[in-house]
Amino acid sequence: MKHYDVIIIGGGAAGFFAAINCAEQNPKLNICILEKNKEGLQKVKISGGGRCNVTHAEFMPQELVNNYPRGAKELLGPFHQFMTGDTIEWFDKRGVALKIEEDGRMFPVTDSSQTIIDCFLNEAKKLQIDVLYSQNVQDIEILEAQEVFQIKTKDTNFQCEKLLVATGSSMKFWKLISQLGHTIVQPVPSLFTFNINDKRIKNIPGVVAQDVEVNILKTDLSSQGPLLITHWGMSAPAILKLSAFGAVELAKMDYKFQIEINFIKQDFESCLDHLKAIKHDFGKKLVYKLPQFELPKRLWQQLVLASGMTQDTRWADVNKQELDSLTEQLTQAVFDVNGKSTFKDEFVTAGGIDLKEVNFKTFESKRVPNLYFAGEVLNIDAITGGFNFQNAWTGAFIAAKTIAKKSPL
Ligand SMILES: Cc1cc2nc3c(=O)[nH]c(=O)nc-3n(C[C@H](O)[C@H](O)[C@H](O)COP(=O)(O)OP(=O)(O)OC[C@H]3O[C@@H](n4cnc5c(N)ncnc54)[C@H](O)[C@@H]3O)c2cc1C
């Protein structure tokens, strides 16, 4: 039997961040991380395409929460305690400088996730945190008389007074937590791309429309932003946001639905007026070769063909039906979505521990005293851009601070 003051289950982003902060704030605590794999921080390693998108340059809590389809309300208070600026300062103090990219994503200046991993491993060592690998936690028991948790892995029993669960998205572990009296919101995937088999986009993978509006028909789901045509369908923020905010609804539809895209973010009438003016002014030119609305040429050409025109149609010869049809393709093009694909840069799971059962001032369970949660194990997830890690850092920091304060110094 091994005894610790604090045990953290899960050696991922939230687990390491919590352990380090707890040890710093209360150096007397005997802290251990139990990690089931032979190495920890595996998701950090592959995150952001190997660069680790650590956080996002959004510094207003009220704005930051808008990026969380699940958890927005609950994270508002915590973000007032620890958010982006604190994350930047935290890493900076430990020699890890972060940089901001044009779209607001923040990465280590080294562009390598290994920098974050090295930082965590060095800090954990310096603070004498026991990081025990190949320790797959299989059972947790609350020994009420002794006021301790008993944790079992395959070959070792552990006991601790304070327990922090940071196991990420793990069905097995959610089951275990439900046995402790917590409700688990059924997990479904979030952050995925849409599979679309459509002539209009078949031969133009790699094309990006800079700012489109996408609506999912028969739902209230809509989003705006860049859209990328891929080999399988569509991706980029306009799509990924819908996949996150619609994670539950789209799962119920079995990922079969229709989207309507306004490629130019103009209404039908103003688009039609513009096209009529072009027809009037450039009658001799070929429609196919004169893209409008700053649309990528190849996308424009596909939409022209889809409107019933050929590569040789001149503006002067475009009839009313073709003009209406092109306007429709530009402002309300409908596509059938049939299935989803994994977004390779970042994916998360919606679902997890019911947020009603957690005190967000401390990240402590409302059901079991001295039990804490941080990271993706909670029913919190975000759109892509560094927000998922920010959730891990914030929850881990607050839980660690609470544990450090509650334990004797
Ligand atoms: C490919 C990919 C790229 C990503 N890129 C980004 C990004 O750039 N920016 C961003 O903000 N988010 C990104 N994310 C999301 C981000 O990685 C997660 O939100 C984050 O890792 C959650 O941290 P966590 O500590 O809660 O869980 P995890 O990092 O998943 O850590 C959980 C740990 O618990 C361990 N564990 C599970 N069960 C047990 C058990 N029974 N016993 C012991 N240990 C156990 C696991 O092995 C794991 O090490 C990405 C995700 C993926 C999959």
Image (cartoon, helix red, strand yellow):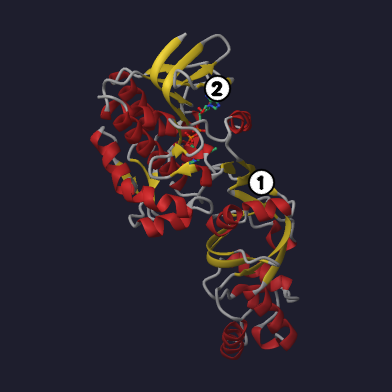
Q: Amino acid at mark 1?
A: Ser
Position of residue 12 relative to residue 32, above or below, is below
Task: Report, in whole angstroms, how far the alpha carbon at label 2 lies from the one at label 1.
Answer: 35 Å
Quadrant showing the C terminus: top left
- Measured as percent of width and height from the top left, residue 90 is found at 28, 38
* N-terminal-most mark, 2 or 1: 2
- Measured as percent of width and height from the top left, residue 383 is found at 51, 51
Q: Residues within 10 Å of mark 1 (few under 14, many from 20)?
A: some
Query: Quick one: SS at disc 2?
Result: strand
Position of residue 389 relative to residue 211, above or below, is above
User: Cβ of disc 2 within 8 Å of ligand 1?
Assistant: no
Query: Quick one: SS at disc 1?
Result: strand
Q: Residue at x 31, y 17 (%)?
A: 128
Is residue 247 toward the left or the right of residue 101 in the image?
right
Given residues 189 and 240, the one toward you in this image is 189
Choose top left, top right, bottom left or bottom right for residue 242: bottom right
Mark 2 or mark 1, whichever is nearer to me: 2
Q: Is residue 233 visible?
A: no
Per the image, the residue denoted by label 1 is 341
Per the image, the residue denoted by label 2 is 140
